Image (cartoon, helix red, strand yellow):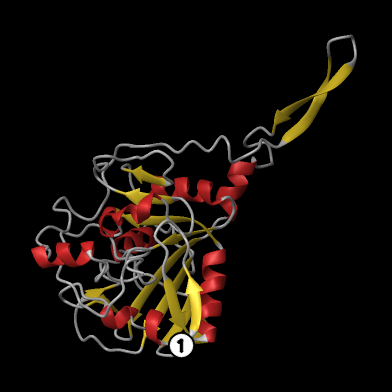
Amino acid sequence: MGRLLGRGDSAPAGARQETSMTRQATATGTCSPSGGLAPIGWRSRTSCGSRPRNSQGRRASRSLAEPVDLSDRFVPDPIDRGEAEAPGGQPHKVRERHPIGAGSLSPLERNIAMSKVVAIMSMSLDGYVADLNDGVAEVFDWYFTSGDVEFHTGGSDPMTFKVSGPSAEHLRDLTSGLGAMLTGRRTFDVAQGWGGNHAWGPAFVLTHHIPAGWPRPHSTVHFVTDGIESAVNQAKAAAAGKSVGVHGADTIQQCLNAGLLDEIHVDIAAVLLGSGVRLFDHLAGTPAVLGNPRVIPGVGVTHLRYPVRKA
């Protein structure tokens, strides 16, 4: 699912550079960004070369690119505020939005308050989401070889996984609870913009610069250039009370460091990579204490869901 979910889009300066082989493999769908649910378009066990990282560093820049218009998604919560005279002399009720800060929340505020931010990644038992060459074949292999139950991703660029019964149930439960996605620019590039529409809801992309040709008509991909907090708030608003899925190691690290992450869902593949790209590098506040996990054993993979304890 390398094109559906993947590792973060940016990294510190001096990181590995992309080779021409990587670009060719990405274009033919034989590789994926590391981590996350298996990428849409990732269809073989071929490991890929490395891909470019943003030389400006991990963090998103600080100017808003594209505020999301949510006016057609949320209906004001009216209350009676007395009567007024309608045409013809007949009274009618005047209905207004609940005032903010008056002891009640608007529908938009309720959606943001209800929405959880959930990290979603696949990784090796020793904590790597990719090898030293950004190869993810072993980490994603279970999506295609662990069973005979088909799971269809949907979206503009659909894929079909073949997994075990427990893994299929896990994927159905996870994806049905998602209302929006949050990712980095690098994942967006590798996924080729998910064909304009991510399978699991509107996608919000952290980036320094909006790519040429975007945003596009009829696309649900939005770009945020004023940082992780703005991106999370916009994604929560669009999720309509459901969870926001986060993919990409760098984006997940930013959410965790900012105290914005509610749950960590990791699919532990039955493999040891020994070295590569770690999911939990660059953490600002450690130890980070997690709650008791929900454990779902699959075939060749174990699914773990941890709540994040917040101070």
In percent of the image, x 40 and y 79: which residue is there?
Answer: 143
In percent of the image, x 69 and y 41: which residue is there?
Answer: 103
Q: Position of residue 267 (x, y in %)?
A: 41, 79
Closer to us: 75 or 47? 47
SS label for mark 1: loop
Which residue has dot 1 on it? 147
Closer to us: 164 or 259? 164
Q: Is residue 60 visible?
A: yes
Q: Badge 1: few (under 14), some or many (20 or more) residues near its Cα, within 10 Å? A: some
Q: Position of residue 291 (x, y in %)?
A: 51, 76
| Outermost residue, top side | 88
Q: Amino acid at mark 1?
A: Gly
Residue 180 falls left or right of residue 128: right
Q: In the image, is residue 75 above or below residue 9?
A: above
Q: Position of residue 48 (x, y in %)?
A: 18, 72
Residue 205 falls left or right of residue 244: left
Q: In the image, is residue 263 above or below residue 97?
A: below
In percent of the image, x 50 and y 50: which residue is there?
Answer: 236
Q: Is residue 293 visible?
A: no
Closer to us: 280 or 133? 133
Residue 30 falls left or right of residue 95: left
Where the N terminus falls, by quadrant? bottom left
Closer to us: 60 or 53? 53
Q: In the image, is residue 203 above or below residue 287?
A: above
Please identify the quarter of the rendering in which residue 29 is found: bottom left
Q: Position of residue 231 (x, y in %)?
A: 40, 48
